[in-house]
Image: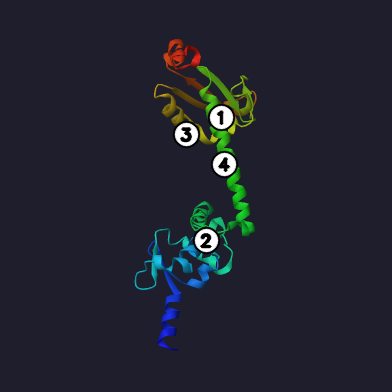
Amino acid sequence: MSTETKADAFRERIILNVGGIKYETFRSTLIAYPETYLGTMFADRNRELLRPTNENEYFIDRDGELFRYILQYYRTGKIHFPPSKDNKYSQEEICTEIDFFQLPIFLHTQQIKLTLSQRAQKASAKKVDEFVNALIQLPKDYETYWDEYEKLAPYIKHIRPYCGVGYDILERFNKEIGNFLKKELGAELGWIVEKHYNDVAKMDYYRVNITLAEDFYDTKKILHYSDLLE
């Protein structure tokens, strides 16, 4: 092999230093996916923009251990998520890297399932946020409860839509909700959530008590911020 040919081969071989962990691959492996982050980075049109160290090494400030899943995609066209029990990283963390490197993840069935899972989580988060907004609209010194059969008593319009999910939301997020309400409405807000057991009905239930400062619904202050006086 001539000196020139060896030099070309050396330039073709690339070392990616990702967060301190080094991976060796070929430029041709990366540009096989031209629409991705690395495919664009090493495209012919961008050669002059690259600033390697040690002639063929490039530093990328991302998680070095997770990058093996990214390089796996360039080499095989797939990302194989390990079983959760055997993996110290969550699929969400891997997906964050997938998004950063702009991989076409919808090409793989397992990734589609993960995307659907993320959609479900976002939908649940939206329901929690709506539930909190409904609580903000409750009258001051209001008390209500949700039982484990997901029934609400008494019914009022602001929280009626959440009679089917209120117990579950409080079971999971009552501390976070209380902290959020105090941050939004002021430290003077009282937020008490107590879990009880009904011996007659033979079921658990949450009792919620919300109290606000006396001037929270002050008529003059409300009119000051209202369009009614404009």
Residue 24 percent coordinates (x, y): 45, 72
Residue 110 in sight in this render: yes
Q: Of callouts 2 and 1, which one flags the residue occurring earlier in the amino acid sequence?
A: 2
On screen, residue 5 above or below 129: below
Dots 4, 3 in contact, CB < 8 A:
no
Q: Is residue 51 left or right of residue 165?
A: left
Q: Is residue 111 above or below residue 171?
A: below
> Label 2 amino acid?
Thr
Q: Which residue is mark 1?
A: 131
The residue under label 2 is: 36
Q: Position of residue 26 (x, y in %)?
A: 48, 73
Mark before the other along the chain sequence, 2 or 3: 2
At label 1, the amino acid type is Phe
Q: Are marks 2 and 1 in contact (CB under 8 Å)?
A: no
Cα distance in 3D space between marks 1 and 4? 14 Å
- Name the secondary structure under disc 2: loop
Secondary structure of the residue carrying numbered label 4: helix
Residue 112 position within the rendered picture, expressed as x and y whole percent measured from the top left: 62, 54
The residue at which mark 3 appears reads as: 176
Crowd around label 1: few <14 · some 14–19 · many ≥20 (10 Å): many
Task: Say left or right for 133 vs 108.
Answer: left
Mark 2: few/some/many CA within 10 Å (<14, 14-19, 20+): some
User: Which kind of residue does numbered mark 3 sit on?
Assistant: Glu
Q: Which residue is mark 4?
A: 122
In the displayed orientation, state which residue is furthest to the left. Answer: 54
Q: Is residue 21 visible?
A: no
Tell me if mark 4 has few (under 14), some (14-19) or many (20+) residues whose alpha carbon lies within 10 angstroms of its own. few
- Point out the tag, 1 or 3, that comes first from the N-terminus: 1
| Residue at x-position 46% and y-position 11% | 219
In the image, what residue type sits under mark 4? Lys
SS state under label 1: helix
Residue at figure coordinates x 45%, y 62% from the top left: 65
